[in-house]
Image: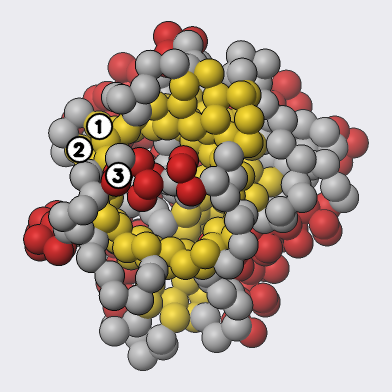
Amino acid sequence: MAEITKIVITGGPCAGKTTGMSWIQNEFNKLGFKVLFVPETATELISGGVTPWDCGTNLDYQICQMQLQLEKERLFEYAAGSMPDEKILIVCDRGAMDNRAYMNDEEFAKVLDFLHTDEIQLRDSYDAIFHLVTAAKGAEEYYTLSNNQARTETPEQAWEIDDKLISAWTGHPHLRVIDNSTDFNEKLRRLIAELRSFLGEPQPLEIERKYLIEYPDLKWLESLPNCRKVDIIQTYLVTQDGSELRVRQRGENGSYIYCKTEKRRITDTTRTEIEERLTQKEYLQLLMEADPSKRPIRKTRYCLTYDNQYFEIDVYPFWNDQAIAEIELTDENEEIRFPEELKVIREVTGDPAYQNASLASA
């Protein structure tokens, strides 16, 4: 069976998506991937005369766009499954949740009802999300409308849409934001590095820093448009080779996704990590292999995008004075910028007492 990975390349207007996908094609073909591209649906529709201003309402247009987007993805996945290649990368030029930035809450709820789905299933159906920040944020001199006839946004509108897009995808387990802190070529090299790291090329590394923080203001977190709450139950399985093997249920309000993760430590900050999506049936079967010496860990995770960084803040039911904040990096020496509302007690990266496997044994 082919190993099929489906990712989204998203970002505000004039962010470099088109060039970035050309780089992805060149780089990952060399690494043995068959790379398939799902074209941007909004550009197809608008260029063909189906626009939000010509349809009866914005809701009518969004239903058209979402249906076409999801049908194209289903066809690409079907085609990928028929191919003889061992590694297939499906790259979506924007994903279904991008449309969330162009709808109000009522419209979005109606679209979900029409599609018979929910936000968790829609957002987390992709394996990873890579957001390229619009040139209107930090590279204003390069912002242009000339390279896409369907683009009409002013720099101010582009900034606002960029924020809404990040907010729409916040809560996904693998969201990366690539900003304009470097020149454009280096920005795209960072995109390739993030994608290589996620795909495990040359090996599946996870570079993570972990901090013990004071118990956060949950009302503040839940009020932020760039923060999403998810409930997690993770169960550790019996292993014979010293690796850490766990299964996880992740979601909220009765809608969940399931995955299996195997980790092996290299340094205090770096581990190899292999993750596999599971069906509910597979998840329930693996629960029979649970390690009896460890209890399942339940936690509420707040996924927070801040200053183009993606924090995961874990609140546990057995603590009322502290919590854990984690952030994944592409470089062990990368600078970390915390919101001033989060009070760091100390870094606990590499401290076994604050690993979830240890907390499960407590």
For marks 3 and 1, the one nearer the N-term is: 1
- Protein image colouring: secondary structure
Residue at left 16%, top 55%?
A: 292
Q: Position of residue 314 (x, y in %)?
A: 42, 31
At x 58%, y 39%, the residue is 348
Q: Position of residue 297 (x, y in %)?
A: 27, 40
In the depicted structure, whether residue 259 falls above or below residue 139:
below
Foreground disc of the pair 3, 1: 3
Question: Left of 341 or right of it: where is 141?
Answer: right
Q: Secondary structure at mark 1?
A: strand
- Residues 213 and 336: in front is 213
Q: Secondary structure at mark 3?
A: helix
- Write down the residue under mark 3: 360
x and y, in percent, of residue 131 in the image: 60, 45
**Residue occupying the point 82% across, 57% down:** 186
| Residue 185 shows in the view | yes
Q: Is residue 86 above or below residue 348?
A: below
Reply above or below: 115 against 319: below
Q: Is residue 166 left or right of residue 114?
A: right
For disc 2, the marked residue is 255
Q: Are marks 2 and 1 in contact (CB under 8 Å)?
A: yes
Q: Between residues 300 and 124, which one lies in front from this camera angle?
A: 300
How many neighbours does mark 3 have within 10 angstroms: few (below 14), some (14-19), or many (20 or more)? some
Separation of marks 3 and 1 at Cα, in angstroms:
21 Å
Secondary structure category for the residue under label 2 = strand
Q: Amino acid at mark 1?
A: Glu
Label placed on residue 252: 1
Report how far apart the C-alphas of labels 2 and 1 lie in the structure. 6 Å
Q: CA distance from mark 2 to mark 3?
A: 24 Å
Q: To which quarter of the image does residue 56 belong?
A: top left
The amino acid sitting under disc 3 is Ala
Say which amino acid is labelled 2: Ser
